[in-house]
Image: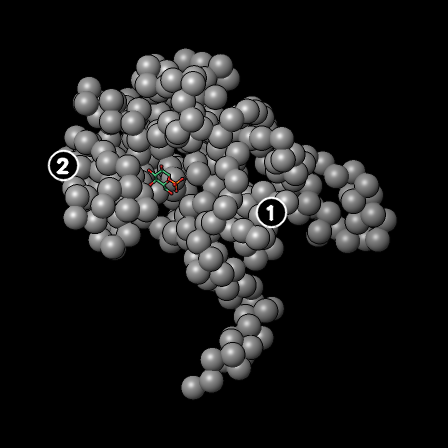
């Protein structure tokens, strides 16, 4: 199993981030100096995923533009001798091969993944969700790819969450079969706290086999108004004993929620040697002891 494609669904409305996202894709909101989507594409690139498939809509062209050359800007930077910035800007354009697919109706994550079928074809592929930023010495999606490639199976990335948070996630019921590796028996999408089988939550990272399209197509009703959940397709893989989970390690920020979004900004700003002291001092002013 060799994986070199990643599907990144970006067609959502970003209602949790309104009003900032009234006319801006939530994925373009900056986390410190870069748009959130850049961290996701950088993670994919670091895991050897050169082909990035955006599942997009008509309001999201700015995301593709971010990964394309901006020749007039490059010309200005070159003319004014801002060579470091020039290099940084150019590097983003050369990060990945971007392929865009329109999701013409927003019918859920399962539907978004199904939209990639004709481009993915018969190859296994990765999926990363734009809300979950994950930082670790081994890129999050690579942690899954390593297991998927050795076991020849679909894998979801999970992390333990507070019991009170389980209703925000897909939750797995699984048995540990190796260090940080689980065989998934069942899944629940956003269960009530009292009904959750565990506190192991799916964290926006998947490696899937094309079999998922078969399952999603079977469940999908083109007349449906409600959401087609990816978890429903995963449940069918699990039922056939074809789904593993890997407990991800790393620092995670759910930038679709304001607290995590703001903390992620501060976290990155604090890594910047030039700004660190200023930021700490300003924060101290804001929070008098
Ligand atoms: C989606 C998935 C859910 C997963 C979550 C991770 O939910 O449906 O299973 O746990 O992403 O962020 P969403 O956050 O899009 O509602």
- 171 is higher (above) or lower (below) than 116: below
Q: Residue at x 78, y 44 (%)?
A: 73
* CA separation in Å, label 1 and label 2: 43 Å
Whether residue 15 is visible to the viewer of this picture, yes or no, is: yes
Assign ligand 1 to one image quadrant: top left
Q: Quadrant of the C terminus?
A: bottom left
Q: Position of residue 222 (x, y in %)?
A: 43, 17
Viewer-side residue, 149 vs 133: 133
Q: Secondary structure at mark 2?
A: strand
For marks 1 and 2 on the same chain, the one whose residue lies earlier in the sequence: 1
Residue 203 is left or right of residue 120, and the answer is left
Q: Residue at x 41, y 13 (%)?
A: 122
Q: Residues within 10 Å of mark 2 (few under 14, many from 20)?
A: few
Residue tagged by mark 1?
Answer: 22
Residue tagged by mark 2?
Answer: 175
Viewer-side residue, 100 vs 112: 112
Q: Position of residue 38 (x, y in %)?
A: 56, 43
Q: Residue at x 28, y 41 (%)?
A: 190
Q: Quadrant of the N terminus?
A: top left
Whether residue 3 is visible to the viewer of this picture, yes or no, is: no
Residue 216 is left or right of residue 180, and the answer is right
Query: Quadrant of residue 212 in the image?
Result: top left
């Amino acid at each position: 199993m060799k994986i070199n494609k990643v599907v990144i669904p970006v067609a959502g409305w970003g209602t949790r981030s309104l009003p900032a996202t009234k006319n801006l894709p939530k994925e373009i909101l900056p986390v410190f100096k870069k748009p959130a989507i850049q961290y996701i594409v950088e993670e994919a690139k670091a895991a050897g995923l050169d082909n990035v498939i955006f599942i997009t809509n008509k309001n999201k062209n700015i995301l593709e533009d971010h990964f394309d050359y901006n020749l007039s800007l490059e010309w200005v930077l070159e003319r004014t001798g801002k060579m470091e910035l020039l290099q940084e800007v150019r590097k983003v354009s050369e990060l990945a091969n971007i392929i865009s697919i329109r999701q013409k109706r927003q019918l859920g994550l399962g539907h978004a993944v199904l939209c990639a079928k004709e481009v993915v074809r018969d190859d296994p592929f990765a999926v990363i969700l734009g809300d979950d930023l994950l930082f670790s010495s081994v890129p999050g999606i690579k942690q899954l790819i390593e297991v998927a490639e050795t076991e020849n199976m679909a894998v979801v990335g999970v992390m333990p969450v507070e019991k009170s948070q389980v209703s925000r996630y897909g939750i797995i019921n699984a048995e540990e079969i190796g260090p940080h590796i689980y065989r998934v028996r069942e899944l629940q999408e956003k269960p009530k706290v009292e009904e959750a089988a565990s506190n192991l939550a799916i964290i926006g990272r998947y490696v899937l086999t094309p079999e998922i399209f078969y399952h999603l197509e079977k469940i999908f009703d083109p007349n449906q108004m409600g959401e087609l959940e990816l978890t429903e397709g995963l449940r069918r893989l699990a039922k056939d004993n074809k789904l593993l989970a890997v407990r991800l390690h790393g620092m995670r920020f759910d930038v679709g929620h304001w607290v995590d979004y703001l903390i992620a900004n501060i976290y990155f700003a604090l890594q910047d040697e030039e700004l660190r002291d200023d930021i700490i001092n300003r924060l101290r002013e804001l929070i008098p002891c």
